[in-house]
Amino acid sequence: MVINHPQKASELLFPLPQTVEDLPGTFRFHTGLCIATAPLFQSVGLFACEVLGCKAGGEDILFKENRELQGEAYEMKISKQQVVIKSGTTEGAFRGLSTLRRLILSAQNQIPCCRIQDYPLYEWRGLMIDCSRHYFTPAFLKKLIDIASLFHLNRFHWHLTDDQGWRIPIDGWEKLTSTGSKRTLLQHTDNRSYGQAYSRQEIQDIQAYAHMRHMMVIPEIETPGHASAALASYPQLGCTGGPYETQDRWGIFEDVLCSGNDEVLTFLGDVIAQVASLFTDPYIHIGGDECPHTRWETCPKCQKRIQDQGLGDAKELQSWMTSKICAMVHDAGKRPIGWDEVLEGTQTMGLPQDLIVMSWRGVAGGIEATKRGHQVIMCPKTEGCYFDYKHTDDPEEFGNLGISRISEVANFSPLKDIHDEVAKPYILGSQGNLWTEKITCGSQAEYMLFPRLMVLAERLWNPQESDQTLQRIEILHTLCDALSLNCYKGPLS
Ligand code: ACM
Ligand code: ZN
């Protein structure tokens, strides 16, 4: 006979809270329970009723206000009779609810009693999804946002434009979606086209869904490279005038936005102003990565711009463009973020201080950015943060370009290789990036994301010794099963 001993909260929780004290007994969760909240937490209470399937009107699960708890901090006491979550903000209350939800899922409704005090180590805990190479449905994006928030992630970076598709409507530039969202599927011989764009309503709806879960949404508009879809729509925005096509191959393409053409600046100004009004959070990501300068070297307009502006070379032309685009983001009332190439060619020119640098090629770009006074998000492909990479080097393993082993993720820290104390406060946190060249559906995306994303979430919330993280990986398998997520369960290193 199998005797099912109830486990301890300290053995079930992932991310592990800052402190968790196991107490004797269990609290039996069922949907007949009632939820009550302090007035400040009404929205969290409604959300809790929805996700837990409970009703309002009783104090089985109680959200109380404690103004001493700041930001995302919360406390939770689970006794045999009651769950009490205390916090000073709705965000803190939401994080407490997420911990409770995970305990309910892991403990199959017999929740071990415990006392928890909790708060995060890093403020930027993100997930990036490339919706250009693969268009994910709004319903699937919502599923990912919900799961990410369940593990205390708080940033959804939405990669909306690239060579292979433009996925956001812009007034006055309708071809971006009518032409730029579609590509021919050359892998098939029937000339079908692939792709669509999100409507404004869908974008607003996804934002509202994310905000309910205390996740900010950061739209990314790629500039000045990775722009084939924009060029296919409006060939006059390129150096040669085209014709161009929305790409159906992967890689880096030499045709990019022309930096000498004032119409490109008008175009980007329109796009950024409209993106800024559609998205309510403070940031716009302006791309900046992998922009070849081949066309600029021979384009008369680009060369004239270099001369007129007294720039040394095409690298400086890119930083001139970056500065212009940052100014557009500022004019639209937002704060810019760029991939680490934005630092190149700026040694003498500088960039706006508030530009946040996303370090992806390694950690060097991020370290250099801190020296120049920029805040940094560390998501190096070399340290396990790229979730399009394979889980192992097994030739049968699914994935693209490289390997991000779970053991690497379990060792990752945004502060890795940062030895200068002065640099540390500039590091905001990290995120997992899912590029989607090889991905054709949601269940493949899930296989790449889980459980790596959850391991990263713990690294950013409350990192444990990597051995201890890896020993607890089965908690994540159980949770993924309970959440109907396709999860990789193979070797960890
Ligand atoms: C990137 O992976 N090209 C940012
Ligand atoms: Zn040009």
Image (tube, rainbow, N blue to C red):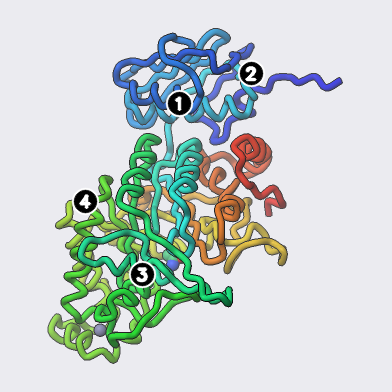
Q: Mark 1, mark 2: which one is toward the viewer? A: 1
C-alpha gap between disc 1 and disc 4:
30 Å
Left of 262 or right of it: where is 144?
right
Q: Compared with residue 356, is residue 20 higher up or lower down, i.e. above or below?
A: above
Q: Identify the mark nearer the N-term, 3 or 2.
A: 2
| Callout 2 amino acid | Gln
Mark 1 residue crowding within 10 angstroms, few (<14) / some (14–19) / many (20+): few
Q: Give the label on residue 277, or none.
A: 4
How far is mark 3 from mark 1, CA to CA?
38 Å
Residue that badge 2 annotates:
110
Residue drawn at 52 percent across, 18 percent down: 115
Locate residue 322 relative to residue 402 in the image: left or right: left
Residue 260 numbered tag = none
Residue designated by label 3: 180
Tell me the element at label 2. strand
Q: Position of residue 343 (x, y in %)?
A: 31, 68
Q: Amino acid at mark 4?
A: Ser
The numbered mark, 4 or 3, whose residue comes first in the sequence reads 3
